[in-house]
Amino acid sequence: MGTVPDKLARGLAYAGVAMLCAGILVLIADISTRKTLGFSILGTIDLTQLAVMGCVYLAMPLAFLRGTHVGVEFVADALPAPLARACRVMAALLTAAFLAALFWYSLGQARMQLAQGDQSVTLALPMAWYWAPLLAGLAGSTLAALLVLAREVRPGDAR
């Protein structure tokens, strides 16, 4: 698994995990200061939402590329090899199309919110901070799904 797409997807996933770790640290600090010093850290919700969202979307490309996402394979596993391959090709095609549509729709929503200058509720963080990992994750996931599709349709690569 040392291909360039795999390394890029792994880098995105590591960035997502780093975001989640930072969010967890903020949450731990908030709970600790509330219990010991009697005050809460301002913006904990904004930061943890950003961290969780970033982790999820930045980890998605690696999951699609490696096939570790949730799937219903028990149906296709019982089929003859050519039919099972056709199912995998169709699934990869539908996945890539769905992710591309999600990316396109999200890009439009991001542009609208950025044009309006929307910010997070408590800390007034620019919404670009929230849209960046989402769009990067959807773009990476779309590319990963296209790579899976290419792998499935390549002659001689049947599982």
Image (cartoon, rainbow, N blue to C red):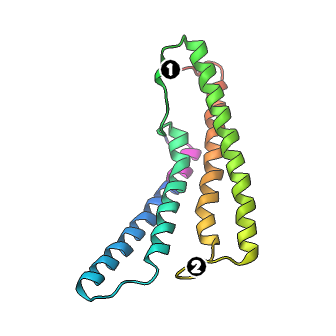
Q: How many numbered marks, from 0 up?
A: 2
Identify the residue at the far top of this view. Answer: 80
125 vs 109, left or right, is: left
Q: Which mark is residue 75?
A: 1
Q: Which residue is mark 2?
A: 125
**Which SS class for mark 2?**
loop
Q: Position of residue 66 (x, y in %)?
A: 50, 38
Residue at the spot 43% in from the left edge and 64% down from the top edge: 20
23 vs 29, left or right, is: right
Magenta region includes residue 126: no
Say if 102 sits above or below 147 in the image: below
Kind of residue sitting beneath label 1? Val
Residue at the spot 45% in from the left edge and 69% down from the top edge: 48
Kind of residue sitting beneath label 2? Leu
**Which SS class for mark 1?**
helix
Q: Position of residue 102 (x, y in %)?
A: 68, 50
Say if 52 sits above or below 35 in the image: above
- The reply to whether callout 1 and callout 2 are in contact (CB within 8 Å) is no
Neighbour class for label 2 at 10 Å: few (<14), some, many (≥20)?
A: some
Disc on the earlier residue, 1 or 2:
1
Give the residues drawn in magenta, as a range.
Answer: 2-10
